[in-house]
Image: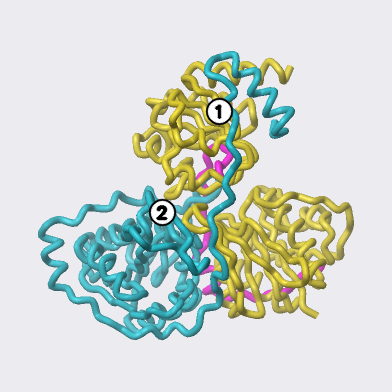
Chain colours: A yellow, B cyan
Amino acid sequence: MSSLLIVAEHRNGKLKKSSFEAISKGASVAKDLGLSAHVLLIGGTEVAGLTAEAANYGVTSVLTVTDPKLSAYANRAFATAITEAAKAKSASVILLSATSMGRELGAFVSVKLDASFASDCTDLQSAGGTLKVTRPVYTGKALSTVELKQAVKVITLRPNAFPVLSVPATASVESVSVSFTEKDFGSKVVDMITASGKLDVAEAEIVVSGGRSLGSAENFKILEDLAEVLGGAVGASRAAVDSGYRSHEDQVGQTGKVISPKLYIACGISGAIQHLAGMSSSKVIVAINKDKEAPIFQIADYGIVADLFEIVPALTAELKKRSH
Amino acid sequence: MNIFVCVSQVPDTATRIKPAADGKSIDKTDVNFILNPYDEIAVEQALRFKEAQGGEVTVVSVGDDTVLNTIRKALAMGADKAIHIKTSDEIDGISAARAVADVIKNSNPDLILTGKESVDTNSGQFATFLGALLDFNVVNVAVKLDLTGTQLRAEREIEGGKEVVETSLPAVVSCQKGLNEPRLPTLKGIMASKTKKPEEIAFNGGSAYTTISELVKPPAKPAGKIVGADLSAVPALVDLLHNEAKVI
């Protein structure tokens, strides 16, 4: 019998939120398609501590591929591990998160399994026993329905696009034995450069973003203060990045990140089409801009037509006041 | 060093996208096609490696004759030669990658560069497909590359930071903004590109594994609410976010 395999990611000994989203979606798709669902965890000794949590979403089993050498990420070895686990379970659907890791692993595995591949999907419907995959193209300016023709289908899911649905349960834990070759470790991570405690705009549930009208890198401090009160991340328009106010990893838009947070607060962003493409799928959009004609107001749920330098600190203060 | 750069053409990022009458593709009327911005970074990186260590840069693109403009831009930037894998059939990422792998595999490539994604399909899969097909090492979303002999040390962008990756050639690397600032073609480069005739090769990528069955505009959002135009709007906004939108 064929099955559905979900690849869960972990960093610093914790499963990622996007993986809980993928496991939740995978469990429900498997049910619709009449498949058993398995979660796969890959890594070193840290994996043993993660299996119980991975089981909490109604899957049949949690599979592990462990090896001391897998405690550091090596894309080819991880792809081999997924391929072997998929073969062991005759998986016909493989789900990953569309993260920096999931996107490349999905592509690798699809070649190894001669499968169809669709990346960064925002909707996956399985009612009636067939899979319908939706993915944004042209950076969200259009939505495409993709037909995956091969028997085996590999799909990555956009973070924050699917809900986490916890189903308290236990699942069997099964170790899959995989033998690796030297080539599998031909490319490996030797170090990490982490901006200390910084939440990534692509993963944050709340994003406060600024445009060129912030005027300087220092002025982004008021957005950082607001983001901090909200537990969110700070993003920036391309104009702000090109002006040197923020680094490219914070850029939201067509040549930056495409994000779907729960709340997006655009401060002093006019809403160029290239920016709108990156954030228009946010669930709730707030725009703060002096110019009432700014295109951002056309897609905002709530707008304040005023100077951001006046409104943003007041908003931070108001939120602080209410949290007491 | 033998470097290949895979490039594609995409609608200019300022384009308003309209679905075509077939409901599966975009209306190409009045669309200005450009060299994919991330591929431009890949071309620049190839030229820098060539300038530092010698070698040859070959640009590869798959598609009908309209891709020749894109190829010409890369040649004008300074690429030495170009391969046009010609097809007007429906292709997808994997069939394009198979076609490129088939052409490159016997040319002893040291390094294959491409953009981290094309800004039309946003799949970000091509470099990995190519690496997997050629059995080469792969680094995606590179923002820094240091090459010493055949050893490559890369920094790649991940969520909330960067990974430092060590690998060796031959390798496929996808390039991210921040890696370099692409040069503009010089007049001399533009003139020289006119004498470099792309080699035309028939497409041998097999069938596509995915098709787009529908392409639509995202649903329009209902008109929003202007909460106010001064400080009094602030508490009102917080109330709305809390009680109506329920996002804080």
Rendered view: B93 above or below B16: below
Q: Position of residue A224 (x, y in %)?
A: 54, 27
- Residue at 42%, 40% (x, y): give it: A272
Q: Nearer the viewer, residue A277 or A208?
A: A277
Residue A29 horizontal/vertical position (percent): 76, 64
Above-or-below relation of A155 to A14: below
Mark 1 residue crowding within 10 angstroms, few (<14) / some (14–19) / many (20+):
many
Quadrant into which the C terminus of chain B falls: top right
Asked if the stretch drawn in magenta spans residue B147, the answer is no
Q: How many marks?
A: 2
Outermost residue on the front side: it is B21
The chain letter under disc 2 is B
Residue A303: mark in rendering: 1
Q: Is residue A74 visible from the viewing direction of this image?
A: no
User: The disc numbered 1 marks a residue on which chain?
Assistant: A
Mark 2 element type: loop
At 44% from the left edge and 75% from the top edge, which residue is drawn? B97
Write down the residue under mark 2: B176
Residue type beneath disc 1: Gly
Would residue B49 appear left or right of A115 to someone viewing this image? left
Q: Which residues are magenta?
A: A174-202
Question: Is A84 situated above or below A303?
Answer: below
Q: Residue at position x 13%, y 72% from top? A: B195
Percent across and percent down for residue B144 are 39, 52
